[in-house]
Image (spheres, helix red, strand yellow):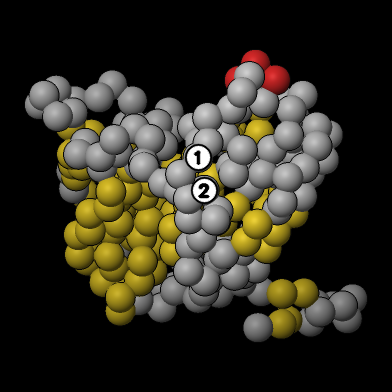
Amino acid sequence: MFRTPAHGLPVLALTVPLLAGSVQGPVRLREKDGRFRASLKDCVAILEPIEAPVPAAGPSKPLVIRTVGKEFHPRVSIATPGTDVTFPNLDHILHNVFSVTQGNRFDTGQYRPGDAPRVKVANPGLVKLYCNVHHQMNAFLWVVSTPFAQVLDGRSGVRFDRVPAGTYRLRLWHPEAGDRTWTVAVGDGPTQGAWELEVSLPALEPHKNKFGRDYAPPADDRNY
């Protein structure tokens, strides 16, 4: 909606829902031995509308995922459909980034130190990222169409504010736990809960290279 003030220049007036609340509460990650992990690093929380007046999120600001020390940084990221993602190579060796995720398949090809190939993610879902040169490199990009999504690094739980009243699906995910969902009803005020994920997957998911074959061991890992 546009309003025209006294000086005659139209400005965008944001519509605030008449009823808005919040979703908040602790999240715990249980290890295989029953203990709870001290950190929620790499854990993702997504609030997906089921019956709620939430407009789809437009493209987010360009995302940068660096390759440094034969690792992706950050390892876990969030973007919206249409977002550009750049992969600067900060190492002194060749890298490659590829994904075989349906709907977001891409391959940068091998690229040199200092190069920064860019791709655009198109469809919602979890995009798994790998390097065709180094088997141990993996990362995860959640492409979401909701404005309510968080990486829980440095937090003890979830907190979504200014959430329009309605019914939602709270999705929690971690690379070593997979995802789990709960139905959450939001009204005018805080909706509180406590949620838990259980570690059940290996730290490095088994995967093939971009050709669907096993990775060949490098001849000299110091320079490769």
Under mark 1, the amino acid is Tyr
Q: Quadrant of residue 48?
A: bottom left
Residue under the image location 77 percent in, 42 percent down: 111
Residue under the image location 59 percent in, 27 percent down: 218
Q: Position of residue 45 (x, y in %)?
A: 36, 50
Dot 2: few (<14), some (14–19), or many (≥20) neighbours within 10 Å?
some
> Along the line of sight, which residue is nearer the eye, 37 or 219?
219
Say which element carries label 2.
Answer: loop
Asked if 80 appears above or below 199 in the picture, the reply is: below
Residue designated by label 2: 209
Position of the C terminus, as image quadrant, is: top right
Q: Going by the picture, which residue comes out furthest to the top? A: 222
> Along the line of sight, which residue is nearer the eye, 47 or 22?
47
Q: Are marks 1 and 2 in contact (CB under 8 Å)?
A: yes
Q: Position of residue 43 (x, y in %)?
A: 37, 40
Q: CA distance from mark 1 to mark 2?
A: 6 Å
68 left or right of 26 in image: right
Q: Position of residue 12 (x, y in %)?
A: 71, 74
Q: Return the mark for residue 215.
A: 1
45 left or right of 124 in image: left
- Looking at the image, can residue 187 be seen? no
Q: Position of residue 49 (x, y in %)?
A: 35, 71
> Along the line of sight, which residue is nearer the eye, 216 or 37?
216
